[in-house]
Structure formats: C-alpha cells, structure tokens
Amino acid sequence: MEKFELHILGCGSALPTTRHFPTSQVLNVRDKLFMIDCGEGAQLQFRKSRLKFSRLNHIFISHLHGDHCFGLPGLVSTLNLLGRTADLHVYSPTGLQKVFGPLMEFFNRQMSYQIIYHEFDAGKPATVYEDRSVTVTTIPLRHRMPCSGFLFAEKPGLRHIVRTAVDFYKVPVYELNRIKAGYDYETPDGTIVPNRLLTTSPDVPRTYAYCSDTAYTPAVAEQVKGVDMLFHEATFAGVDGTRAAETFHTTAGQAAQIARMAGVGRLLIGHYSARYDTDDVLLEEALKVFPNTQAANELACIPVR
C-alpha cells in the first residue's frame, strides 16, 4: 500500500509554549507532500521530520490568523535560498495574496520560483485541488474570520498484478499497465484471459479531514462522514466551554461528538490552549465520548489507515 500518512509539525494554538509549536501538518500522499497550515517554526519542524522540500508543492491555509500562516515568509525564503525552480501553490481564503504578496516581494526580490495563489470563498464547499492521486475539498467552518477545513480524498489506485497468473499466461511486460487498469488480456492465439484472473482489487481509498479553528458546528459531521481520520481542533476543556464559545473554538468533548456523529474511523485532536499544563485533560475528555481518539504531538507520523 502506498503512503498516506500525516506528519504533525505543530499542534499548539496562538500563545506559544515550550511544549508545542503553532499549528502545521504535512500529509504525505504517495510521496507527494501537502502542507496544511504553516505556523511559526514550520520549516524547522519540516527538517526535523526528515521531509524533502523538493516534494512540497502545495500549501493549504485554513484562515489568516497568524498562528496558522506566520511560518510562510520563512519557508518561502528558505526555498528561494535553496534555488527552487518549481512553482509553489498556496490555497487560502480570500486575502492572503494581498497581505503576503508585498512581504514576499520585499524580502525575496530575486525569486528563483513563482508563488501561485489560489484563493477561495470559505463559506461554501469547493474542490480546490485535484490530481490523479487525490482530491482536496474545502470544509466551511465557523470562526471569527473566514475559515475552512480541508478534506483529502485519495483516488482509487490500480489493480494489483497476480504475478503467478501473469507468468502462467506469459503476459508481456508492456501489457501490465493495461491489465492494472482493468483490461482483459488477449493471448497471441486469440484467447481472452479475464482481468479477474490476473489481478486483485486495488486498495480501498483513504480519506483525511482537517478541521481547524471553529466553534462547535454539528453540520461539519455530514461533510466528514465516515472519513478514516479526522483532525478536529480541541482548544479547550469542557470546564472552559464559555470561553470556547466566546472565541469560536471547540472543546475536546465537542470535537469527540463531531467524530461520533460522523462515524469516523479515528479522531485526532490538537490546537491546545496554552492554559493547560498537560494535554491529558483534553484527551481524557474526548475519550469519554469517542474512544478511538488520539492526541496530536509534534513530530508524530500517523498512518491515516
């Protein structure tokens, strides 16, 4: 099975602590890297995770609060120093180019590559990226400014060759790609060998949903229904529910309720408030509602399934 794994670069919220970096993640889909949010220090954590800058071509920003995008200027500058030539695509709610464009131009006057901004309306779901491996769709959230989550849906892969059958029927190498795509094989004497004898079914596609800063929004459950893994912010514990509502954030228990309503395979919580000395209080609260919950932690690499 090809890679579909999540790297946690940072899982803290706005106020810095000695335990957590601001929010940033990298999803590895078949060795293509997709960064999700880019808080301060993201490029340092990227290095520590032993990821390759050359495989990073797409960055998705959930909203324009600093703890989710202050890492962009440093990352862009580093890629320039490394002599990058490939385009870098950045996806965000409307406004990022207006804010960051002049900053990038001032500090990187001789860019070796081009930044291409893809801005979208955070108020409605939309497909913002698609290739032969994955589709990325936005998830409208409720925060103090336009904010969007992202749903990464892997596309079905090719069928798996049964080596013994291929050898038995003496299938030429140049026919293998057609057979992986589902076609039957015709022997030189005209006999049709059904594809089901030559292959097995492809791996079941995997899905990952990222829900950044948001007030408790039950409607989200419908869009992330049945995903293999859901990351949902869990900034506050239930005892601080009033503060969560005031700041348009979610408690750990509410994040777990979303996971339960959506019937997801696994819940990953993060975006921890600096007020807590330990994340255990948040994890324990979520576990009571949704037992298959995991707490995000820096430099963790988590297979989506």
Image (cartoon, rainbow, N blue to C red):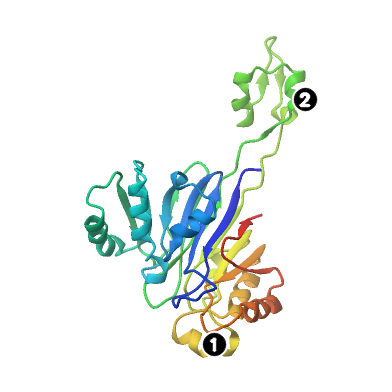
Q: Quadrant of the C terminus?
A: bottom right
| Classed neighbour count for the residue bearing mark 2: other residues with Cα under 10 Å, few (<14), some (14–19), many (≥20) | few
Q: CA distance from mark 1 to mark 2?
A: 60 Å
Q: Work out whether residue 128 can be spotted.
A: yes
- Residue 166 placement (x, y as % from top left): 72, 22
Q: Secondary structure at mark 2?
A: helix
Residue displayed at 57% across by 60% down: 299
Residue displayed at 76% across by 24% down: 165
Q: Which mark is residue 78?
A: none
Residue type for callout 2: Thr
Q: Is residue 114 left or right of residue 167?
A: left
Q: Closer to the N terminus: mark 1 or mark 2?
A: 2
Q: Secondary structure at mark 1?
A: helix
Q: Which quadrant would residue 90 be assigned to in this image?
A: bottom left
| Classed neighbour count for the residue bearing mark 1: other residues with Cα under 10 Å, few (<14), some (14–19), many (≥20) | some
* 225 or 46: nearer the viewer: 46
* 290 or 75: nearer the viewer: 75
Residue position marked by numbered label 1 in the rendering: 241
Residue displayed at 36% across by 52% down: 78
- Residue 295 placement (x, y as % from top left): 63, 70
Q: Residue furthest top?
A: 189
**Contact check, label 1 and label 2, Cβ < 8 Å:** no
- Residue 19 placement (x, y as % from top left): 55, 73
Q: Is residue 32 above or below residue 24?
A: above
Q: Is residue 266 above or below residue 280?
A: above
Q: Which quadrant would residue 292 be assigned to in this image?
A: bottom right
- Residue 36 placement (x, y as % from top left): 47, 59
Q: Work out whether residue 182 can be spotted.
A: no
Residue type for callout 1: Gly
Q: Is residue 123 above or below residue 2?
A: below
Residue position marked by numbered label 2 in the rendering: 164
